[in-house]
Image (cartoon, rainbow, N blue to C red):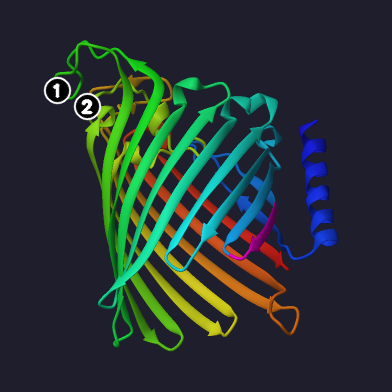
């Protein structure tokens, strides 16, 4: 029934764009081979096919859009899922705000991963003496169909500064403050936790606050070559992720379902080289180094035994290579075909069994926009 519903929805949206016109439509597919798509210590390889649809319409400063994705796994078809999102926004020269609602629908075997997410945001742009200043705030509410303990809301505020120089150098810096509350989770904190800190004598919800800051330097090396280097620091400044281990491993799980970036602290170094091979043919080479510390997690000594007296520490290296080619299909350049070929290698070294893994993937993407 889910497949019939999804197919019917795609057909209706496609016909509406044909009949009504004045819509922007994007149809794309990504074909990928991964030797460890779920980042397990014992890998299971799979071919992954993703089919995507995007429909947008803008009327003056107001816009609406619908986006859908259906992903299939050749060796693990019980993992197949559909994701879709609907949103609207309003944008002026200095202010943009919007609201998005998204949903993930899994197969019966994994329906406990089903969730619904709502996000509201506002962004503001100004310029003071040649410095572009971007400020933003957002509120996100996430509800899981079967795992109510993971239901949460998160508030976020941030500022980014951007300044360019005649040397073709751009400096970017900023910070973000996040506050997250797993409001359906009650923790018995009537004890001293494993970090030796005294806890409250009453039950509390799982709350975490984090502040991140980053600095980025982008330099044009020639008319066709650019290099960017960025440093990002993540710091947990309060809440249960800093003081209590009773959250268990689920709240810091790095899987694609429960990736919780505010459950860890540490730093990231990344560098990206961009090379224009022609006006519409681009090569990007990227490297990431992530150092992560999970103060709310113990470690898995093996598949089943957990040691809560040792915190989880990860060190991650990511290398990616991506080619993109744009093919314009009409004289106005508003119909185009985007072709991409990518490779990524991840080595995640961890003192916790379930997070010590390696993963490589290669993918081919085709995106038709009109």
- Real-space Cα distance between discs 1 and 2? 7 Å
In the depicted structure, whether residue 358 falls above or below residue 153:
below
Decide if residue 266 is in sight here.
yes
Q: Tell me the quadrant of the picture where the N terminus can be found.
A: top right
Which secondary structure lies at badge 2?
A: helix
Determine the residue positioned at 68% across, 64% down. Answer: 367
Task: Tell me which corner region of the image, top left, top right, bottom left or bottom right, holds residue 205.
Answer: top left
Relative horizontal placement of residue 98, taking residue 309 as reference (left or right): right
Q: Position of residue 172 (x, y in %)?
A: 30, 68
Relative horizontal placement of residue 61, taking residue 303 as reference (left or right): right
Crowd rating for badge 1 (residues with CA inside 10 Å; few <14, some 14–19, many 20+):
few
Mark 1–mark 2 CB contact (< 8 Å): yes
Determine the residue positioned at 30% across, 57% down. Answer: 159
Q: Is residue 8 magenta?
A: no
Q: Position of residue 97 (x, y in %)?
A: 48, 54
Determine the residue positioned at 35% across, 45% down. Answer: 156
Residue extent of the magenta highlight: 52-60
Decide if residue 258 is in sight here.
no
Q: Nearer the viewer, residue 235 or 24?
A: 24
Q: Nearer the viewer, residue 7 or 29?
A: 7
Q: Tell me the quadrant of the picture where the C terminus can be found.
A: bottom right
Relative horizontal placement of residue 272, taking residue 57 as reference (left or right): left
Counting residues from the start of the chain, the first of labels 1 and 2 encountered is 1
Q: Identify the residue position indicated by label 1 in the image.
A: 197
In the depicted structure, whether residue 36 falls above or below residue 336:
above
Q: Nearer the viewer, residue 138 or 200?
A: 138
Q: Identify the residue position indicated by label 2 in the image.
A: 243
């Amino acid at each position: 029934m889910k497949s019939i519903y999804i197919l019917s929805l795609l057909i209706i949206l496609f016909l509406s764009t044909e009949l009504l016109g004045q819509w922007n439509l994007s149809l794309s597919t990504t074909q990928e081979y991964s030797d460890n798509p779920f980042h397990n210590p014992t890998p299971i390889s799979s071919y992954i096919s993703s089919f995507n649809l995007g429909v947008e319409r803008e009327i003056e400063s107001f816009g609406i859009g619908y986006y859908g994705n259906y992903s299939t796994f050749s060796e693990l078809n019980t993992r197949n899922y559909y994701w879709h999102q609907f949103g609207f926004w309003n944008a002026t020269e200095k202010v943009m705000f919007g609201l998005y609602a998204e949903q993930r629908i899994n197969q019966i075997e994994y329906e406990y991963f089903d969730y619904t997410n709502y996000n509201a945001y506002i962004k503001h742009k100004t310029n003071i003496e040649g410095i572009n200043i971007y400020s933003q705030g957002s509120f996100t509410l996430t509800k899981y169909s079967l795992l109510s303990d993971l239901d949460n809301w998160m508030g976020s505020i941030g500022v980014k500064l951007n300044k360019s120089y005649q040397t073709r150098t751009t400096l970017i810096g900023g910070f973000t403050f996040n506050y997250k509350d797993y409001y359906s989770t009650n923790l018995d904190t009537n004890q001293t936790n494993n970090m030796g800190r005294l806890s409250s004598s009453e039950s509390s919800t799982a709350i975490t606050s984090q502040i991140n800051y980053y600095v980025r330097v982008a330099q044009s090396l020639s008319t066709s070559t650019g290099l960017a280097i960025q440093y990002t620091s993540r710091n947990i400044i309060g809440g249960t992720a800093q003081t209590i281990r009773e959250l268990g491993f689920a709240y810091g799980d790095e899987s694609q379902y429960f990736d919780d970036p505010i459950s860890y602290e540490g730093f990231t170094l990344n560098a990206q080289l961009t090379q224009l091979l022609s006006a519409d043919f681009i090569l990007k080479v990227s490297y990431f180094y992530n150092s992560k510390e999970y103060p709310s997690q113990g470690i898995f000594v093996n598949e089943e035994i957990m040691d809560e007296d040792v915190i989880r520490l990860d060190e991650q290296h990511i290398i990616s290579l991506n080619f993109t080619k744009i093919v314009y299909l009409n004289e106005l350049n508003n119909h185009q075909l985007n072709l991409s070929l990518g490779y990524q290698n991840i080595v995640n070294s961890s003192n916790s069994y379930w997070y010590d893994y390696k993963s490589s993937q290669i993918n081919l993407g085709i995106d038709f926009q009109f």
